[in-house]
Amino acid sequence: MKTFRETLSALRQFAIEFLCLWAAVMGLAGCETVQVPTQTDIQHGQDVAIERIHISALTEFVTVSAQPDKVQLKVVLEFLDAFDLPAPVPCVLRFELYRFHPLSSDPRGKRLILWPEKNLTGVKKADEHWKDLLRGYEFYLPLDFMPRQGKKYVLEATCFADQKRHNDLFKVEVQPIKD
């Protein structure tokens, strides 16, 4: 008959062997299944994720060169990544122009214009608006009214990219119109 010490020693030896075997199996097999990316998870050419958009101070009202009595809004828009560096990103943009509402937490008053969405997911269309010198996109948005001198407006740009929505507001004041 075995003594209590011999039984306890055998039990300890069994526990040590079991733990070593379990550690070896977990080390070789891993504890989770392998994740194979599907085709929808792979997005070609989108190695830059934007953190925010910024309407540049170069945004202003300008006259149409062919028609001096018509005015359009020149918008310079930057997409900034996590390091605040501008980068071109395929996206869909929407621009809205509002009257400026002073002394309010929301400066947007009545909406004056909602322009059609700009689809920049195609390379040709994105390159058409990308200005490398400005490190941003440049758009000329037509106006169906003549802005008055001294009036203030709020431009809102909304960007839909990487299944996220980013927006920015910018106050545009009518200065003497540039050609």
Image (cartoon, rainbow, N blue to C red):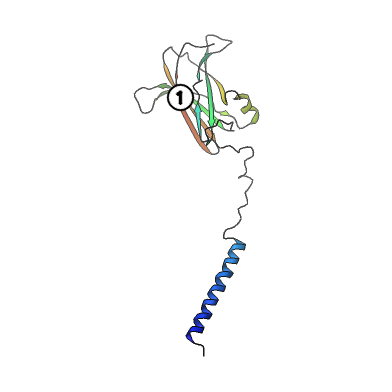
User: Residue 85 or 45: which is nearer the viewer?
Assistant: 85
- Classify the position of the C terminus by image quarter: top right
User: Residue 46 or 159: which is nearer the viewer?
Assistant: 46
Residue farthest top in this picture:
68
The answer to whether residue 25 is above or below residue 97 is: below
* Image location (x, y in percent) of residue 89: 58, 33
Instruction: Determine crowd level at label 1: few under 14, some 14-19, many 20+ residues with C-alpha closer than 10 A.
Output: some
* Image location (x, y in percent) of residue 124: 65, 28
The answer to whether residue 71 is above or below residue 167 is: above
Image-quadrant location for residue 129: top right
User: Residue 138 or 143: which is nearer the viewer?
Assistant: 138
Residue farthest left in this picture:
103
Image-quadrant location for residue 46: top right
- Residue appearing at x 51%, y 83% in the figure: 7
- Residue appearing at x 57%, y 73% in the figure: 17
Q: Amino acid at mark 1?
A: Phe
Residue farthest bottom in this picture:
1
* Image location (x, y in percent) of residue 15: 53, 74
- Residue appearing at x 47%, y 85% in the figure: 4
Task: Please give the residue where the numbered disc 1 appears in the rendered image.
Answer: 170
The answer to whether residue 12 is above or below residue 96 is: below
**Number of on-image labels:** 1
* Image location (x, y in percent) of residue 94: 52, 28
**Which element type, helix, strand or loop, lies under badge 1?**
strand
